[in-house]
Image: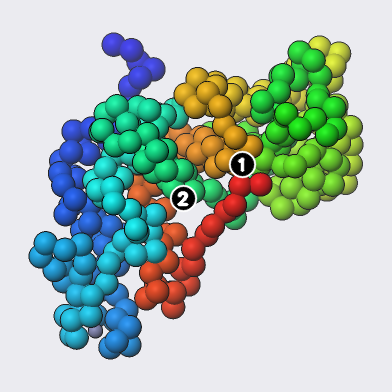
Amino acid sequence: MNRRQTIPQHLRYTINDFNRQFPDDAACLEHLMQQRFPGNVTYCDKCQQEHKHYRINGRPVYSCDHCGTQISPMAGTIFEHSSTSLRLWYYAMYLMASTRCGISAKQIQRETGVTYKTAWRMFRQIRSLLSETDMQLEGSAVEMDEMYYGGKRKGQSGRPMRGDKKKSPVIGMVERSTPERIGRVKALATPDVTTNQVLGLVREYVLPESTVFTDEYPVYDRLGARVNQHKRINHSAKVYVIGDVHTNTIEGFWSLVKRGIGGVYHQVSQKYLQTYLDEYSFRYNRRDQGNLIFISILKRVAELAALPASRDHGMTPVIQEPF
Ligand SMILES: [Zn+2]
């Protein structure tokens, strides 16, 4: 038995579980309806109040039990206007949640027979659900570092020259894990790496009482004024760890991303880089959830849905354009 592959029972969600819970489109539709409108109760535009809704046989819609006005639980979600079956969408989300390194459009094309273009579009849509825009890092120890996608790794040839268009910089911040909770990451594709960028991101995502660990790169020079403590490791002198001073956690995340993008996706355009970073971050931030990550993705569908009737409940679509 390969112990490393073993997910604790309560965090396991196998393909059999999937097939049992979602045998067909109808089961997926009912699940979507329940996620968005528990008890099938939602606001009816015509009645101007909350009413229970009932499934119309043979059509993917529900109707108000008072006036008969129909709503579609798919409206305002990534499934709207899609000719792909809902179950296939769910299966694609299941696949994306069940891998550590990502899943390619080619694979779902092979498994399900949809065209490559359809598969690629589905994954792009699913990725768009995974950006955690307002997440704040609350850990007391945070590592910060940059990587350059599409370029040589730093350390081999140093950081790229400013204005080097072939390399897309990504700035990352990660909490170190504690016995109580796993550390989470925030990774952002940025147009460049400057002192202002770095300070802005720290102000936005890192608590002032945190200790931040970086290397000796000058863009991090002024960090100390923004946080409780700034500790640095001197990589150019080939020193990687002194006591608790290191950036190994964020570098571990970078290698996961690079291995994944390089091995599964082969090439990612600058335009979509942020959405891939969101995918890897989403899984990394839930790596203690086994493959229940699938359930988290399903929840995001409902959270980000923008059915007109739901606007009154403060649900607005979150559209994150890649940088
Ligand atoms: Zn009604």
Q: Report which quarter residue 63 is drawn in.
A: bottom left
Q: Amino acid at mark 1?
A: Lys
Q: Callout 1: helix, strand or loop?
A: helix
Residue drawn at (46%, 34%) of the image = 287
Can residue 158 be seen here? Answer: yes
Q: x, y (%) of residue 252?
A: 61, 23
- Identify the amino acid type marked 2: Leu
From the viewer's perspective, is 89 left or right of 195?
A: left
Count of marks, rendered view? 2
Q: Which mark is residue 297?
A: none
What is the residue that sits farthest to the left in this orientation? 57
Report x, y in % for residue 83: 29, 51
Label pair 1/2, CB-CB below 8 angstroms = no
Q: Which residue is mark 1?
A: 271
Whether residue 138 appears in this view of the structure is no
Residue at 71 percent of width and 37 percent of height: 171
Q: Residue at x 46, y 50 (%)?
A: 129
> SS for tag 2?
loop
- Residue depth check, mark 1 versus mark 2: number of the one nearer the observer: 1
**Is 305 situated above or below 123?**
below
Q: Which residue is mark 2?
A: 129
| Viewer-nearest residue: 132 or 78 | 78
Crowding at dot 1, Cα within 10 Å, few <14 / some 14-19 / many 20+, comes out as few
Looking at the image, tell me whether mark 1 or mark 2 is earlier in sequence order: 2
Residue 176's x, y, as percent? 62, 33
Residue in the picture at 81% in, 12% down = 238
- Ligand 1: quadrant of the figure: bottom left
